[in-house]
Image: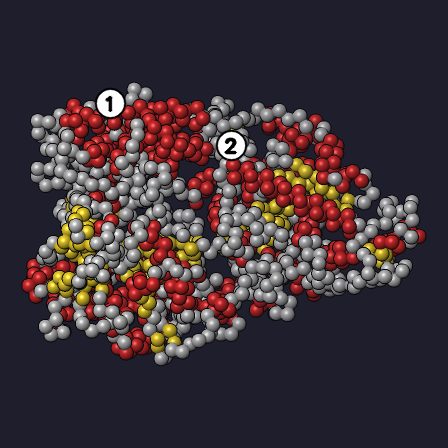
Amino acid sequence: MAAIAPSVTQPCQTCGTTKDKIYSCVQCNNLSFCDGCWSKWILHLPGQVGWDGRAHERSDPLVVLRMRQILEPVRSETEHEAELRDDEDTSWFGFGRDGTGHPVFHDYGRFAAIMADSVREDVPERHPQLASFIGETGAGKSTIIKLLIDRQDLSSTEAPRYYSPVTSSNHDRIPTTGDVHLYADPSSIHASQPLLLCDCEGLSGGEMLPKQLRNRADDLANGYKTSQSRKIAWAKTPNTRKREFAVAQLYPRILYTFSDVVVFVLRNPRAFESTVLPKLLKWGAASIDKSLNQPVLPHAVIVLNATEPGVDEKEWDVDTATQMLMSDIAGAVHREPVIQDYVTQWRKRGKHIGSTKELLECYYASVSVVRIPYKGSYMLMNDQSGKLADLIRDRAQLSHLRKRKVRMLATPEKLQFYLHAAFDHFTTDLDTPFDFIKETLRHSPVSRNFEGNILNLALAIRDRAANSKVKNNAKQIFRAMVPIIASCVMFDTVRQNLLGTASRLLDDRYAKPCTAAMQTFADMHWPCSFKNSAYPGKSGQCCNMRSGHNPKGHQNIQGKIIGNGDYESDLDPSEFAPTWNHFIRQSLIQLQSSAFRLSQEFPDMPEIQVAALLHRERLNEQYSNILGAATDFISYSACLCCLRELPECALPCGHVLCLPCVQIYGTRTSKTTIEISRCPLHIRDVIASPPWILNIKPDHAGTRTLCLDGGGIRGVVQLTILREMEKILGPELPLQLFFDLIIGSSMGGIIAIGLGVKKWSAQATMEKFKDLCKEAFIPREMKNVPVFGMISSLYHGSLYKTQPFEKALKRYFSEQPFFGVSTNRSRHNVSLKVAVTASTLIEHQAVVFANYNRPDPIRIWEAARATSATQPFFKPFRKEETDYEYVDGGVHQTCPIWVSHHEAKAIWNDKHRPDLVLSIGTGQNVGDKRATSSTMRGNTNTPSSDSIRTSNAGYFYRDPRTPMLFSFNNPGAGAERSDDHREGEEIWNKYMSRGFVAESDRSRYMRMNPELFSELPKFADVTKMDDLEQHTEDAIRRNPGIVLEVVHRLVASTFFFEKDAGPVKQTSEGYTCTGAIYCRFRLGSSELKALGWLLVSTSCLEGDFEPYFLLEEDKTRLPARQIVLTQTILQDMHFHGHFELEPLTITTLDETSEISLSLILHQTPYPSGSTVLPISGFPRRIMSEPAGNVPAGFGEMKSGMFPINPSSCNKFHSTAHPHIHAAASMYTHAVIVKSRSLPNPHSHKAKNGIFNQFLFTKIAHPCSSHSGRRTGVL
């Protein structure tokens, strides 16, 4: 910025001192005076006045300097044009034309750039606020914004480094700036409520192109300026194709809809009533009916700019100025015909308007007036600018509080989504209103807890119930849920073994979340019932929700205000909730009474089986008799069978159940498998024949996790290692069988999906990975040409083409959902969990996409695209359905060990130590001791940063010493970071040093990152993949024992010990229990046979050595025992798939003694120095553990048990409460429960009448200890 800074240390004109505070007198030719000499100067004597009729202003030299830099910049025309070009970086959105001359809307990404560049780790959540400055061309909007920004840095004589508007030149005859620019308020940008200042193009600029935009078209064409362009679909006539039309019609709709404060700047207050007021009302009227459910109206601040200093002193006060202006124009509603038209419109809507202030408040939440003096009165100008800044912040805070009250606050990510949705909406249709709540719900999924499940149940009935009388009446929806909720409460209290009466438990644990769900439904999901018969059909129906109703009143679907008044509905939670809870209580009492009678009829039936049996029958009754079909209700966010747990087991019918429900309603065919042929939600239907088989982790078994670093084409290193592991295991033992969870970041995420979701072998994944990289890393034109390559990358937003990459991902990974639909068509469903990391574009928040749980559906290829959206190589990935944008997970998690740590704890919710955490890097160079790029990167988020970022990536001025072209974010900088192979190692070392891993468990955490003697290739150097593969093989051959140890640890983890049911016995020798060693693989399976062969071949390598298990009880008292895997046992495994060892009796002196049980596969120590490999879950304190075997479910028992015959479902009926309509739910949760055999339903004791009074519903506990299941977002 060109500005000459005069000295501010001038001595006093009279006494020459420089020690005292010095003041400057502008009217005395900038003479300086100390405090004592000021009043002695002849022109400062009492009674003396200056040219403005007031006493000379005692000015702070620094304030004068800053005001002159703002208002009277010294610059040439060339310098002015350079400033305008620099200011283009602040462009937010605007009007333009495509190659054919058709109008287009440009979005330059300024909002996202400011928000991304100002992220602070110590501010976990931010809610941006927007103040828009509107006015006639030449009114001084840009100058006012510049005052607000630049005055905040009065401690320096240099020009401010913050972006602020460029003011006009004295000899300009055309508008200076065009489009809409966005600036950050320096005082709040890093706070929880950052304020953004929006400078809108003047409303009367006409078709004349503003000075700043003269070169915009060339900039866009040459790549100096990037934007996302949208064709303006409604621009079809000569009038609508004009720039002036867009400025007057399109811009207000966007800014009015999203602004917290609208600042109207004008210069001639005398013409306010006749000229300015109609435009103020017109601007609001053009926008008020163009949005539905708007949570707040913007606050209006009227700035009377360039006010003569001679006005009444009282008018410099904001409240007084507001009162006086409103008093002056109070009668305009009776005098001005144009204004009377607005009054007439509101009267037709049922609202009486008595004054102009009341009319303005129909369009704005409040109206305030601030006067800004004409230049020359610099101290007064600084004071008034401070008052304006305080007023804007105060009004923005009121808006914030209102949004918080109605739960419609937006984070930067969400506000960006709303803005994009509004851009799409208003460029397509200028007249249809933008619906705030519709967009809010699209980006704010329902909470995944008890309250959220009840809300989802209500929404499901509203949207999918077959009975229109139920779905179209809010009270009927909640009445219909009563039997469902009561049954779920009953089911939950039984399985948690909660003590107390039904009424007490309902009041203590469930009633409050139920009421909260009803309140949310009423606030956000049920429209006002007001109807205006004067409007035909649906146009007379109010469609605003309670949360977005009050600012405007009744609006129809077209946005037109059809009446005045508050939200109306038959459903008032404050009145209906107590009645509703009473209905639930009565239904619950009936259920418990019926369950008691059934238990009396069948005294051998456990209580949990009674509850589960009744629960299943009620679900079927509700779906078949009320809702139509269970297959119409599918959820990926909650188990529909119990509303307790998150779903993870996908069934062939499309339903996704939680593991505990599968354990209850399926048949336990082995220690690690469950079969299910009928879904408990529609028991009459056979969903799989032969039965669907699901693998489960034994209760006390450990987990096996594979973590894959990001690194571009260097993923070849990981696949080479995994392929070597595959070779040791053999072709019949896929790697997938030995892991419970695979986590990948960036290209490691693509490998994770290939291995874990597509079930490719390591060799197949290697082949596809190489092909994919060759298709992905297709450079843009002129990439290697100096300057031009960078311009091309800047213009397109990435170094490599995105479309070929996405096409390849779709071809390899398909359009199938990443979660919720089983992609494995075989009978054997391997429950391998896969997660990939990504980060949100703006806030850089870590995100996890998982195949075991996801609140929003995402396809397999989309998960791969999101995790691999490495900047600057590829553009961010934008999810069309939600408008979320993601970049690769390597932004924070090059090595995803932290994600692995949190995900494993959340998924299995236990404190068992893992069997193995294997982290594989992408190689490292021998002897590379350079500092990692992460330690070299500075923090550019503070004003003191020396690194000033620009071009859609910051809010500071660029360094004037750097040529503008090269002050843009250089894509090469991001590429260098991605080429740094040491970050993954650094993350791993930090994790291992943080105390999360006990010293005794460190051997379970293994990092494989081979040191290579050749230089590692760059992230995208596809020509080096084959060489890298060869170098990795060489590194493995130099130290083959590491791979062998990893494989043998995985083999050991396939065995586990299960304690027999029953209590631990206390004897004279201590404590004893019995149990046996089992294998995770099913009896008779090809996997068990292959494992037998692997053990046979391993033992053959060491002569007469036989593998054995080593049991170490009390190490200080009892000798270790060997359980030998004889050749007979191994051959039985290999030929027959049979593995059975004699039961073990374990004895310990102390109940808390730790017991070790390990597998020894050979006598030679591994590279770690150990020869002992713990089997899964060991060491353990077995004696203090609860009896842990989970018996088979009763859903499909063998003969002699008590299955519910599908054909007998119609024999069970229910009598609901007389005021309750039966219905069904959408969501469910459950916990693991035990079940034993049930009596035969056809015996003489099974009386159908027992079930006649049973009401059946389902619900989840509001504070479930199992709520830790991950949603996918860290």
**Type of residue at label 1?**
Thr
Q: Which residue is nearer to you in this view: 1168 or 720?
A: 1168
Q: Which residue is nearer to you in this view: 1177 or 1022?
A: 1177
Q: Is residue 512 toward the left or the right of residue 406 in the image?
A: left
The residue to which callout 1 is attached is: 1215
Between tags 2 and 1, which lies in front?
1
Q: Is residue 325 toward the left or the right of residue 260 in the image?
A: right
Percent from the top left, x then y, of residue 114? 55, 55
Q: Is residue 462 toward the left or the right of residue 545 in the image?
A: left
Q: To which quarter of the image does residue 213 belong?
A: bottom right
Which residue corresponds to the image point at 43% horizontal and 58% vertical from the top-left? Answer: 887
Tell me the SS state at disc 2. Answer: loop
Which residue corresponds to the image point at 14% horizontal and 63% vertical from the top-left? Answer: 1122
Q: Residue furthest front?
A: 1068
Q: Residue furthest top?
A: 1218
- Earlier-in-chain disc, 2 versus 1: 2
Tell me the SS state at disc 1. Answer: loop
- Height in image: 702 above or below 931? above
Percent from the top left, x then y, of residue 1065? 17, 47
Q: To which quarter of the image does residue 219 belong?
A: bottom right
**Type of residue at label 2?**
His
* Residue 340 seen: yes
Q: Which residue is nearer to you in this view: 893 or 502?
A: 502
Color scheme of the displayed model: secondary structure
The residue to which callout 2 is attached is: 549
- Height in image: 510 above or below 1046? above
